[in-house]
Image (cartoon, grey):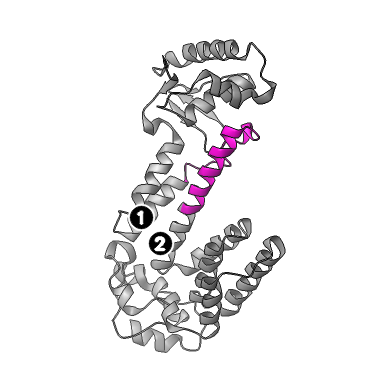
Amino acid sequence: MDFRILGPFEVVGTAGPVELRGAKRRGLLACLVTHAGQPVSTSWLVEELWGERASDGAARTVQTYVSQIRKLLHGHGVGLATRPEGYVLEVARDAVDAHRFEDAVAAVGAEPSLARRLSALDDALGWWRGPPLREFAGAGWADREARRLEALHLEALQCRFDALLELGRAGEAAAELEDVARAHPLDERLWAQLMLALYRHGRQADALRAYQQARRHLLDEVGIEPGPELTELEHRIRDHDPTLVATASSLAHVDRDDAGFSGEADGSYSPADTRLAALVRTDVVDSTPLTLRLGDDEASSLLQRHL
């Protein structure tokens, strides 16, 4: 049985979705899912599900709902135990999509291969079907868990953008970051990633405009200037700081599985060079024809230098 809270709340058995009706019943089970493997007391459930509107019979109602849910889950081999500390949903950790997502993101940092790291993040993000627990928005337990999961989701996205940038896929990162940064306008790390992606993709003016957008959001919404890291990045982009683009040395040390490209450690690439590296990294290894679309006057010299 699979419990899904990364999007609309669903319980899926071997034969398909398991139907559970009633807002409070669904809320009780979802609450137990978010605390899977941990005891949850009746008094806590009453407080979280009813709050100040709880009646004298709310505790008995919880017991009734638990009995009904227990029967429903028992037919699918899932236990809902009663212990002195409270009720415990007894399921494997990987039976809850949020736990799978959390564990996958935590494991990414130990993966040395950028390509495999990116693939693992893509798989994990694929479990995300929409805002978590929206059906129960306004309930304290649901809002707290939703905020935690959304923060983890954003962290996974940022790690993914870092991997794309390290792999020389600045154009792809920029295309995705433009939407994500605007969805989280106060997150300076996202704006920094967007600025760097645009600059490495040969779009210096757009990178500087992105800084101005970030600055306007911060001033308008919280009345503060961008932090020193974002401000420094804007200065470095304006000054064409050569350390902002991928170096030949760094590309040479990327795993062949990651990039399929090996550069010469003889200096820094310009943004146009980086775009060329992204174009040729698989084409050179696979011996397939290369179509150059840089549209720069320096195209022929770049080809001579790198091919």
Task: Name above or below for residue 159 compared with residue 230.
Answer: above
Task: Name above or below for residue 26 compared with residue 193.
Answer: above
The answer to which of 303 and 117 lies nearer the viewer is 117
- The residue under label 2 is 163
Circle 2 packing at 10 Å, graded few (<14), some (14-19), many (20+), is many
**What amino acid type is highlighted by mark number 1?**
Arg
Task: Name above or below for residue 177 compared with residue 199.
Answer: above
Q: Which residue is depicted at the point 41% across and 69% down?
A: 168
Kindly indicate whether the residue at mark 1 contacts the one at mark 2 (C-beta within 8 angstroms).
yes
Which quarter shows the C terminus? bottom left
How many circles with numbers are drawn on the protein?
2
Distance from Cα at disc 2 to Cα at disc 1: 7 Å
Circle 1 packing at 10 Å, graded few (<14), some (14-19), many (20+), is many
The magenta region covers: 126-155
Q: Which residue is depicted at the point 58% across and 14% down?
A: 59
**What amino acid type is highlighted by mark number 2?**
Ala
Q: Quadrant of residue 231?
A: bottom right
Q: Which residue is depicted at the point 49% across and 21% down?
A: 41
Q: Position of residue 191 (x, y in %)?
A: 56, 66
The answer to which of 157 and 89 lies nearer the viewer is 89
Residue 259 lies left or right of residue 187; in this view the side is left
Q: Residue furthest right?
A: 220
Q: Position of residue 303 (x, y in %)?
A: 38, 84
Among the two numbered marks 2 and 1 on one chain, the one whose residue lies closer to the N terminus: 1
- Is residue 289 something one can see in this rendering? no
Q: Is residue 258 magenta?
A: no
Q: Which mark is residue 134?
A: none
- The residue under label 1 is 117
Which quarter shows the N terminus? top left
Q: Which residue is depicted at the point 31% across and 71% down?
A: 261
Task: Name above or below for residue 44 compared with residue 292.
Answer: above
